[in-house]
Amino acid sequence: MPIQLDHIIVPAKDKRESAEFLARILGLDVGAQVGPFLPVRTGNGVTLDFMDSDDFRWHHCAFLVPDEEFDAIFTRIKESGAHYYANPDGSGEGEINTRDGGRGVYFSDPGGHAMEVLTVPYGGSP
């Protein structure tokens, strides 16, 4: 079996708020709580396990999405009132990027994490 990413623990000031926000933006579901974790499972089986934490440091999570779903996701980002921007350094506020022949946008979740959706793999082609 090839090596695969199974899950990542995402510390959050409020795990429910952060998990529900991301699930709503991506059109996913929040799973049932398992121990201290609220899981959001992606289409390739990776789980983001949100956990309440006082020792909070921001994470960056990037999600590869089909081009035909990007517009709906971007609409939900704008409707959420989240800060969004074209570049990882926070520049290009209110814009998307078109690097590598695709589209991408960075956005902040309620807990301060930097999330990203993109339509082509990082450094790749469609």
Image (tube, helix red, strand yellow):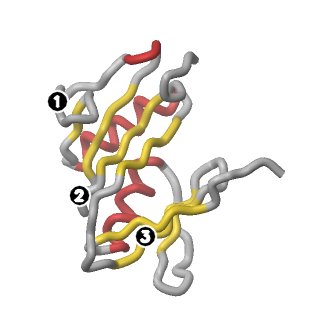
Q: Which mark is residue 50?
A: 3
Q: In the displayed structure, does residue 74 sit left or right of residue 102?
A: left
* Nearer-the-camera pick, 79 or 16: 16
Q: Amino acid at mark 1?
A: Ser
Classify residue 76 by image quadrant.
top left
Which residue is depicted at the point 33% across and 36% down?
Answer: 75
Residue 77 drawn above or below residue 20: above
Quadrant where the C terminus sits is: top right
Can the viewer see residue 30? no
Question: Which residue is the extreme one toward the front?
Answer: 3
State the residue lying farthest toward the bottom: 35
Residue that mark 2 sits on:
112
Quadrant housing residue 34: bottom right
**Left or right of 85, for residue 60:** right
Q: Quadrant of residue 96?
A: top left
Give the mark nearest the N terminus, 1 or 3: 3
Distance from the alpha carbon under mark 1 to that under mark 3: 27 Å
- Where residue 91 is drawn, which disc sits there? 1
Q: Secondary structure at mark 1?
A: loop
Crowding near pointer 3: few (<14 within 10 Å), some, many (20+)?
many
